[in-house]
Image (cartoon, rainbow, N blue to C red):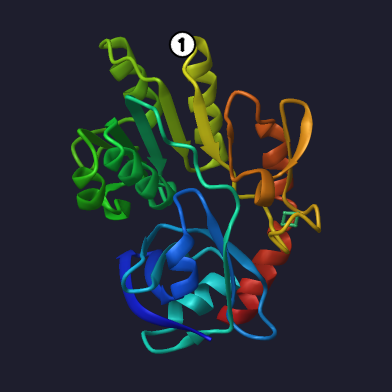
Amino acid sequence: MYKIVRKAILNPSVVLMDIEAPYIARKAEPGQFIIFRIDEAGERIPLTIADYDREKGTVTIIFQIVGKTTRVLAEMNEGQTLLDFVGPLGVASHLEGYKKVAVIGGGLGTAIAYPQAKKLHGLGAEVHSITGFRNRELIILEKEMEAVSHKLIVATDDGSNGNKGFVTNVLKQLIEEGNKYDLVIAIGPLVMMRAVSNMTREYGIKTLVSMNPIMIDGTGMCGGCRLTVGGKTKFACVDGPDFDGHEVDFDEAMRRQGMYKKHENQSTEIHVC
Ligand code: FES
């Protein structure tokens, strides 16, 4: 059993939890994920590791309340336990050897971008972070991102934080101001990662995206997480979750992501009613 040792509400629909999982905390690296199950009857949900503390033996997860399971998890409190918490799964991000990197987090994607920015910062890279949210109430991890970035620009779609814009526009401006990035990392909604990848392709900048498709076993057995990358079938759980953004077939990924929307909505309605 895996105990929830800390719970924090980051915004009205996003929750942070530190889970006691010493063996995972000991080995976790940025880019990797866990799969949890609340109880025997629960579905398996993959979540990218947002942080870890090897000394305390905790792993931080940050999730958005989007369906039945995340709603049930959000209702749980410190001291309660999860039945399964498996990981670290997936390939750790390769972040060594870069000098100047733009790290982009779109919405909840900021929770996944944060450990990447932190690691790059620790490796001595100049990190320019750009995060984007619909409005200022939804902004998360601002202080944390600031602490690991040479420059942080937080943009909102409606300008309610005084900085209206989309992450793609901010990145374009930074590039055109003469910033020479040897890597761009974009993590967030598929439309955002596609837009960033299309833009960086024009500038010839290597771009990594983090794919989080439907997953079941997380070990390459079921094929549920398949994607097309560079014309080849890849499994996000064992070949990723990081992939070259210029090679990912985002249109196919979007079609697959919407496949179970109806079932998810029905399940949430049953839980809420
Ligand atoms: Fe089953 Fe990746 S989740 S193959």
Ligand 1, image quadrant it occupies: bottom right
- Image position of 221 with respect to 118: above or below: below
Query: Left or right: where does residue 207 sit relative to residue 165?
Result: right
Q: How many marks?
A: 1
- Image position of 50 with respect to 106: above or below: below
- Image position of 51 with respect to 119: above or below: below
Question: Is there any visible trace of residue 156 in the rendered image?
Answer: no
Q: Secondary structure at mark 1?
A: helix
Query: Left or right: where does residue 163 sit relative to residue 112?
Result: left
What residue sits right under mark 1 in the picture? 203
Relative image position of residue 105 (x, y in whole percent)? 39, 41
Quadrant for residue 164, please give it.
top left
Quadrant for residue 241, please give it.
top right
- Residue at the image position 26 percent from the left and 37 percent from the top: 159
Question: Where the C terminus falls, by quadrant?
Answer: bottom right
Relative image position of residue 252 (x, y in whole percent)? 73, 36
- Residue at the image position 58 percent from the left and 84 percent from the top: 83
The residue type indicated by label 1 comes to Tyr
